[in-house]
Image (cartoon, helix red, strand yellow):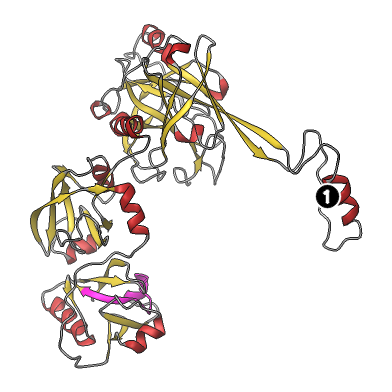
Amino acid sequence: MRSNRFLRAARRTFTVGAAALLIGAATVPSPAAAADGPASVADLAQGLLGAVVNISTSQRVKGTEGPGAVPMPQLPEGSPFQDFFDDFFKNRPGEQGNPSQKVQSLGSGFVVDAEQGIVVTNNHVIADADDIEVNFSDGVTLKATLVGTDTKTDVAVLKVDPKGHKLTAVKFGDSSKMRVGDWVMAIGNPFGLGGTVTVGIVSARNRDINSGPYDDFIQTDAAINRGNSGGPLFNSDGEVIGINTAIISPSGGSIGIGFSIPSQLALGVVDQLRQFGETRRGWLGVRIQPVTDDIAESLGMATAKGALVAGVIKGGPVDNGTILAGDVIIKFDGRDVNEMRDLPRVVAESTVGKAVDVVIVRKGVEQTVKVTLGRLEDGEKLASGENGTADKDNGDEAPAVSTASVLGMTVGELNDEMRTKFGIAAEVSGVVITEVTKDSAAAERGIQAGEVITEIAQESVATPKDVMDRIAALKEQGRKNALLMLASKTGELRFVTIRMD
């Protein structure tokens, strides 16, 4: 059964198989009656209800028909009735083009600054809204303006007039201190039922539900349903340790598997949105891929860990040779990088312009380099306009052979004829793959004709003979796999390992 790969937004539902993931919904567990659970959370809830708000939005969209109107029938092209129906449906008195319709949605949020009137919610709760209203527990409604949004973490910051209502604020707590089994409480607006309190525990931490690049969700069984999105998840001290965002559900209702954005991640985003109206994340300027067991063995690493640098962005912070394609980043600014997905998050949380120590493994040797971070938002524009490159030594000797067959591939010189045949860019260098044998080890790895081998085991190759010599040397060393750095026709790099047995 597939579950956490199917997202359901507050206004969009996708159900696959028996399960779906709801973004914009949360789940409240049945606070089953554990004998040693809290006797009552009434006092805690009473002090927090005033800070939790309902958020209603409206969006004006163009429709194809007015209220109560009959839709125009779909006629075959060239129908003799076309002119008649055009006159009747499109030229009726009082109608000028497509009328505007109003679409409404509901969500939750919470006040974090009473003096400034700052409210936090999910981005998907207010996305594309023309009007946003914040409804308080005592019935007061205030218009809200959008301060800023972040689609990568699904966080949005709103502002209301603090003079329009006496506001109560809550503060963020430290989500990193939460342990699996700790009690939590959710307050929100499920199905439009405002001021709903549910209780549960932290079921798990560091969940990746494939909703964004920085997934690090708190999983809870505290009931979260549609309309809870953007609402707070409190610890037992009444501090916000999460923003309720998504659920896994076969029907759209809570089954006790909900996800919250941890405050440790959300707090920095909220601060940046308040200060700048946008995010300003750190940027390293590398393309990365996972370190598999085969790649680790090929690099001489004892265990598979870290993030493998598959390419360096031209003009980025490390385009000076500080970090190279083929390096494995295992620690960033004192924080361990155990797997690939750890690196984007820790880099993004870092300050733009900060000089940090990065621990890498290069050709089996661990070393530390100093890097000054750029800004991710600027880097995304730069990365979209060029292909990652890495320093390579292509050699000066003339090739001893023009083609060679190795590991299920036929490789040849990358000359003008081959560049034209496969459409390979001028800046790409190495040895071109002209043919891949069906069912070979290379074919299993998805290698295709037209790709270019630039390195084998972190050594540059320029001729078919270089390729054969490198493979032979690896076999003599007792290696079971060969690590190849491949360039696409446009120069984008990736690493693959191929069995040599």
In this rendering, does residue 442 appear at all?
A: yes
Q: Position of residue 223 (x, y in %)?
A: 46, 24
Q: Where is residue 463 in the image (x, y as percent from the top left)?
A: 22, 85
Task: Determine the residue positioned at 22% across, 40% down.
Answer: 351
Q: Which of 221 and 268 is in front in this view?
A: 268
The span shown in magenta is 442-455
Q: Is mark 1 on a helix, strand or loop?
A: loop
Which quadrant holds the C terminus?
Answer: bottom left
The residue wearing badge 1 is 73
Q: Nearer the viewer, residue 80 or 174?
A: 80
**Is 192 located above or below residue 477 in the figure?**
above
Given the image, on which type of amino acid does mark 1 rest?
Answer: Pro
In this rendering, does residue 247 appear at all?
A: no
Residue 333 appears in which quarter of the rendering?
top left
Look at the image and say whether residue 459 sits in the magenta stretch: no
Task: Determine the residue positioned at 37% across, 6% down.
Answer: 43
What residue occupies the far top of the structure in this picture?
43
Q: Where is residue 290 in the image (x, y as percent from the top left)?
A: 27, 56
How would you rate the neighbour count of disc 1 (Cα within 10 Å): few for under 14, some for 14-19, many for 20 or more?
few
**Is 356 located above or below residue 237 in the figure?**
below
Look at the image and say whether residue 444 sits in the magenta stretch: yes
Q: Position of residue 315 (x, y in %)?
A: 25, 59
| Residue 97 located left or right of residue 194 | right
**Is 324 located above or below residue 213 in the figure?**
below
Q: Which of 412 and 319 is in front in this view?
A: 319
Number of residue marks: 1
Residue 410 appears in which quarter of the rendering?
bottom left
**Is 287 located above or below residue 61 in the figure?**
below
| Residue 90 located left or right of residue 6 | right
Task: Determine the residue positioned at 15% across, 85% down.
Answer: 396
Task: Determine the residue positioned at 82% across, 36% down.
Answer: 94
